[in-house]
Image (spheres, coloured by chain):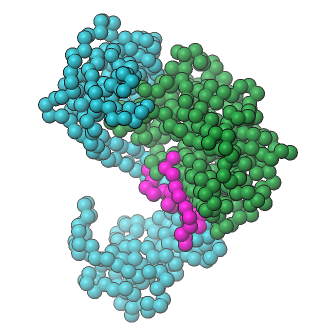
Chain colours: A cyan, B green
Amino acid sequence: MPEVLKAPLVVEFPFTRSLGPVQSAFLTGLRERVVLGVKTADGRTLVPPVEYDPVTAEDIRDLVEVAPTGTVTTWAWNHEPRRGQPLDRPFAWVLVQLDGADTALLHALDAPGPDAVHTGMRVRIRWAGERSGAITDIACFEPYDGAAPEPGGHDGRFEEMVTGIVAPARLDYTYAPGRAQADYINALAERRTVGERCPSCRKVYVPPRGACPTCGVATSEQVEVGPRGTVTTYCIVNIKAKNLDIEVPYVYAHIALDGADLALHGRIGGIPYDQVRMGLRVEPVWSEGGRYPDHYRPTGEPDADYETYKELV
Amino acid sequence: MLGTPPAREIAVVAFGQTDHLRTTDELSEVEMLMPVLHEVLDRTGLKTSDIGFTCSGSSDYLAGRPFSFTMALDGVGAWPPISESHVETDGAWALYEAWIKLLTGEADTALVYAHGKSSPGSVRDVLTRQLDPYYVAPLWPDAVALAALQAQALIDAGDTDESALAGVAARSRAAAADNPHAQVPGPPPQGEYVVRPLRTGDCPPSRDGAAAVILAAGDRARKLCERPAWIRGIDHRIEAHSLGVRDLTDSPSTRLAAERAGAFERPVDTAELHAPFSSQEVVLRKALRLDDTVNVNPSGGALSANPVMVAGLIRIGEAAARIHRGESDRALGHATSGPCLQQNLVAVLEGDPR
């Protein structure tokens, strides 16, 4: 049995998010080392503050400053920090109810070990050295046994309000395409194109995905198709893709390989872009060491009759 | 609303699930899914073309594969186009949508399925992406960390302790010894702390798997299944968004969903609870007022097999299957989604008197 194909896959994206007025004031406040909460209709102070009352769903806008000190309401000892977490040494996750607040904020607590942490312990914010208006402006919490300072009475209006955050997200995967697609990719590396036939309707799918979308049954009978095929439809690409070294304009086409009941797609070369047409007969061109066709070029055969490929357009 | 029976008799008439495995490198999602689709179709004698409505649950984030649910649709014969829908959450919510569809009378049968292939990524990290993107997600608190905060809150409140949690884990795994699909059959050691106070044994083996259910209405259900599991009610509710606003030791959303689903009208004999962490079973038992007369998680629950996006649907399927086999007359199925039991669904199922 051929080896199971696998490859690393990183999905990474910087999410740009705009802020509502309450979030904007809270995160701007963190930049200025001021912690703000928001008052609900029933008089509670929510920290971190939200735009809408969690009970009544009313807009809430009444900001109030709370203290940078508070009490741990629950905790969990994290002996193996993971990427992106606030501290890179063992720490406690904590929910902290800041003095003046009625709800708790999630963050990290820098403590020497689990024996130094308990529910009810007093903590204070340790500010990050560089602050930009983000929850990470709080570097973490630290144990604190002093008195709670008087809150400053800030009204939430600052110079240069933060109106958005950029939140980078990255997830790492090991991608495995599964049996049918692995067989297809392995065959391509030997310059063969292999589809799979549906046992029920007898259609040959290229590339195979392991199932017939019409019959809903597994495909497994391998069928070599091509190498030649027919252009069933195409488009002319006029915009250069990032990181792609192909001169524009070029033609991208649907190609029904001989013996296949589904068209795959590929680039057409070896012919001026404005001479490509439906019915053009093409064959793959393999580059040295390439694991798949670099492009398809005309074979010089007469064009295929429309009737022979109209079901595949 | 309370006490009103559903507008139409609808039942779970078949349930199937894969063996839940640590990795399934050799299978694409559709390849993993197809055997269970065929299992439930074979059991009822239905063909894909007989199905009135198809609804699935999954998340692209698990395998990092965009539009994976459309690929999975190949397995149900979705071309030419069928009446179909998808939810980006546990398949239990797909079952809810299908139940509504059948209640409207627009369809008489529905195929519901869910698949989760989380082995390509790190599910602990992937699940951080569902959190509040402003205040929480930038800190990357993983799923175990958040569950551990809830567990500590329960310990502080005197609702449980570490040895009681170990007892929940051991009971679940012992029950799974009879479940051929479970990934962790039989009791393993409770293990080291993952995030204290939760140990390995308190955490779910979240791996790859798929499940499928067929729903049918009225006489159609009676034809397809010897003892249909009639759905007496389903409801789902959600907690406030922010963890620090909630009382983590309680689950008012579960209690409300159960009330609206009719769970408290008469006692159930069986409850399949979707508690991925041992500590969450403590919360759910309290919210659902389950006493020792109720057989809780005879399948072994999510602590024995927790394919993400599938485990909730499996709970309803397992509850229904016990009714099919005559091992239960009135069962509760529960599903959860999000951190610390954020969102909860409760279904009440009954068999006809024997």
Closer to us: A298 or B79 = B79
**Residue A223: image location, x then y, percent:** 56, 75
Location of residue B134 (image quadrant): top left
On whether residue A72 falls in the magenta region, the answer is: no
Location of residue A159 (image quadrant): top left
Residue at 37 percent across and 49 percent down: it is A11
Closer to us: A13 or A5 = A13
Q: Quadrant of the C terminus of chain A?
A: bottom left
User: Could you tell whether A115 is left or right of A63 in the image?
Assistant: right
Looking at the image, is B305 positioned above or below residue A92? below
Closer to us: B117 or B295 = B295
Span of residues in magenta: B64-89
Considering every residue shown, the one lying at the far right of the view is B354
Note whether residue B343 is visible. Answer: yes
Residue at 41 percent across and 41 percent down: it is B129
**Residue B298: image location, x then y, percent:** 72, 36
User: Could you tell whether B302 is left or right of A123 in the image?
Assistant: right
Note whether residue B36 is visible. Answer: no
Location of residue B258 (image quadrant): top right
**Residue A283: image location, x then y, percent:** 39, 81
Residue at 37 percent across and 48 percent down: it is A10
Considering every residue shown, the one lying at the far top of the view is A146
Looking at the image, is A97 positioned above or below residue B108? above
**Residue B305: image location, x then y, percent:** 62, 40
Residue at 26 percent across and 81 percent down: it is A273
Q: Quadrant of the N terminus of chain A?
A: bottom right
On whether residue B85 falls in the magenta region, the answer is: yes
